[in-house]
Amino acid sequence: MAVTATLELVALDATDIAALASFYAELTGWPAVRNVAGWITLRASDGQEVGFQQVAEHRPPQWPGQERPQQLHLDLLVDGHERAAQRAEALGATRLADGVSWITLADPAGHPFDLCQRAGAGPQLQLFATTIDAPDAPALARFYASLLGMAPLEMAPTDDGPVGPLIVGGGKRLMFQQVSDYTPPQWPDPAHPQQGHLDIMVEDASRLTAACDRAQELGATRLADGATWITMADPAGHPFDLSVP
């Protein structure tokens, strides 16, 4: 019987998750749908979710370097990215870089995110994709496509050049960015922290071990276990959680 693993959400680490969730809620208009000890989840209008996980000793990334790398970032679509960037700065973001059709900012916890111009997208921000850094972006895209049953999608180059590999499925998208001097996280070592992780759901507890075995066959490493979850690292070192509802 095939094991079904489904991408649930991306979660960002932060010391003050209430402040970080409030920043994104104000910027995007996404409501909070879960608020429990150490965790807050926002939901976009299309049903995609972004979580915020409390980490007392969180060390923010320092983009674009690899001494404390970003590891992953959110790509957000909006019609009027300059206006959105100015609003983000007023809410506490820091502008980092400008391209022809995008603006990179750091949120109040230091996580970079991209505001990407998309005519007709409307004024409310949309989550286009979570983009994950990798030393071999095509290989990491194949890993997640195989694990999650997602399909590759070819994208035309933008005004800023070609884009990385993109996989889609279940109304969610993951994109992969080639980084030549990539430095992986070494969870749970606080000297080499993760900046975020993917939550991946398995249908029920009876299939959790099989999903873990499948991930290991594809190149993942098992890191930690709980009663209803298993933490693993993908082939590029990014932690992700396999869990049951």
Image (cartoon, grey):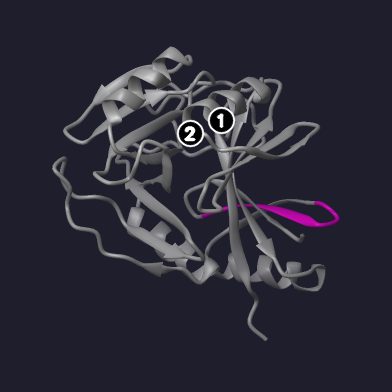
Q: Amino acid at mark 2?
A: Thr
Q: Which residue is mark 2?
A: 28
Dot 2 falls on a residue whose secondary structure is helix
Q: Is 229 colored magenta in this rendering?
A: yes
Q: Is 127 colored magenta in this rendering?
A: no
Examine the rendering and report whether any part of residue 91 can be seen.
Answer: yes
Depth order, front residue of 79/202: 79
Q: Quadrant of the C terminus?
A: bottom right
Q: Residues within 10 Å of mark 2 (few under 14, many from 20)?
A: many
Q: Which mark is residue 25?
A: 1
Q: Residues within 10 Å of mark 1 (few under 14, many from 20)?
A: some
What's the magenta region? 226-234
Farthest right residue in view: 227
- Mark 2 touches mark 1? (CB < 8 Å): yes
Q: Is residue 34 left or right of residue 89?
A: right
Q: Amino acid at mark 1?
A: Ala
